[in-house]
Structure formats: structure tokens, C-alpha cells
């Protein structure tokens, strides 16, 4: 639904339009809200707020942070520890560009050390 202009009269809205407008207002209001559940987890009303919070948790994996968000269907969701954070992506990119050793050289060095390969 396209955004309704503020100059429209309520009488021009269908019930569906009014329902969607109310949902949009509630979504905007809840965008950055959170609460603490009975188990001590931070519960975010939106994925964006959850992601912003995770970005501020320096060096911690999502599994190390006691937080989750509620998706549109009402399920508890959290990011996987296997999803690389921005910092981890940068680290991996740096590692990929570093000098690498050819496999044959590694095998030779292992053989020189007496390792049966």
C-alpha cells in the first residue's frame, strides 16, 4: 500500500487501508523498542534494532549475546554464530589476500620433518 497523504480524510479510507495504516504506525513506534524477558534476554521488536545492537557488541558472536528479536510471525529469532559479522568478514578478506604457501611446499616440509604423508 502506498503511503497515505496526511491531507486525506479518514472517510476516504477503506477498512483495509485503515488497518494497514494502523499496522504501519505501530511498526514505526516499535522499531527500536525492546524489553527484558523472564530469562534475562533482551527482546527486540524488530530485526533492525537487534542487528544494530549486535553491531555494538564488540567481538562477540550472536550466540554469546543474550538477545533475540521477534519476527513478523511472532517467532523468537537470533542470528547464527556462523553468519560472519562485519568485522569477521574484514578479517577473512585480509587473510585471503595474505601470502599463501603452495601445497607441494607444505608436503615437502612435512616429508623433511619425517612425517609420513
Image (cartoon, helix red, strand yellow):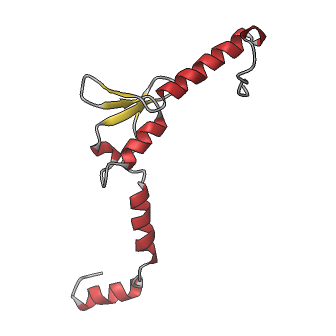
Tell me the residue at 41%/38% (across/down).
Answer: 50
Tell me the residue at 41%/83% (across/down).
Answer: 99
Tell me the residue at 78%/11% (across/down).
Answer: 12
Q: Is 73 in front, or is 50?
A: 50
Q: Residue furthest bottom?
A: 112
Residue 85 x, y percent position in the rendering:
41, 54
Residue 21 x, y percent position in the rendering:
64, 19
Asked whether, in this view, residue 16 is left or right of residue 44, the answer is right
Question: Which quadrant of the figure contains the N terminus?
Answer: top right
Question: Total number of numbered labels?
Answer: 0
Q: Where is 20 relative to 102, above or below?
A: above
Q: Is 48 in front, or is 91?
A: 48
Q: Where is 56 relative to 24, above or below?
A: below
Residue 70 x, y percent position in the rendering:
44, 28
Question: Which quadrant of the figure contains the C terminus?
Answer: bottom left
Q: Quadrant of residue 7?
A: top right
Q: Quadrant of residue 67?
A: top left
Asked whether, in this view, residue 16 is left or right of residue 90, the answer is right
Q: Residue furthest front?
A: 7
Q: Is 16 in front, or is 73?
A: 16
Residue 34 x, y percent position in the rendering:
37, 29
Q: Where is 10 relative to 106, above or below?
A: above
Q: Residue furthest left?
A: 114
Tell me the residue at 60%/23% (across/down).
Answer: 24
Amino acid at each position: 500500500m502506498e503511503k497515505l497523504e496526511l491531507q486525506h480524510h479518514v472517510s476516504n479510507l477503506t477498512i483495509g487501508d485503515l488497518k494497514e495504516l494502523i499496522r504501519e504506525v505501530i511498526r514505526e513506534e516499535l522499531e527500536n523498542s525492546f524489553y527484558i524477558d523472564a530469562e534475562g534476554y533482551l527482546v527486540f521488536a524488530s530485526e533492525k534494532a537487534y542487528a544494530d545492537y549486535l553491531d555494538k557488541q564488540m567481538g562477540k558472536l550472536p550466540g554469546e549475546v543474550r538477545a533475540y528479536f521477534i519476527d513478523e510471525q511472532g517467532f523468537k529469532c537470533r542470528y547464527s554464530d556462523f553468519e560472519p559479522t562485519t568485522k569477521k568478514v574484514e578479517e577473512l578478506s585480509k587473510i585471503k589476500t595474505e601470502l599463501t604457501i603452495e601445497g607441494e611446499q607444505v608436503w615437502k616440509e612435512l616429508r623433511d620433518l619425517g612425517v609420513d604423508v
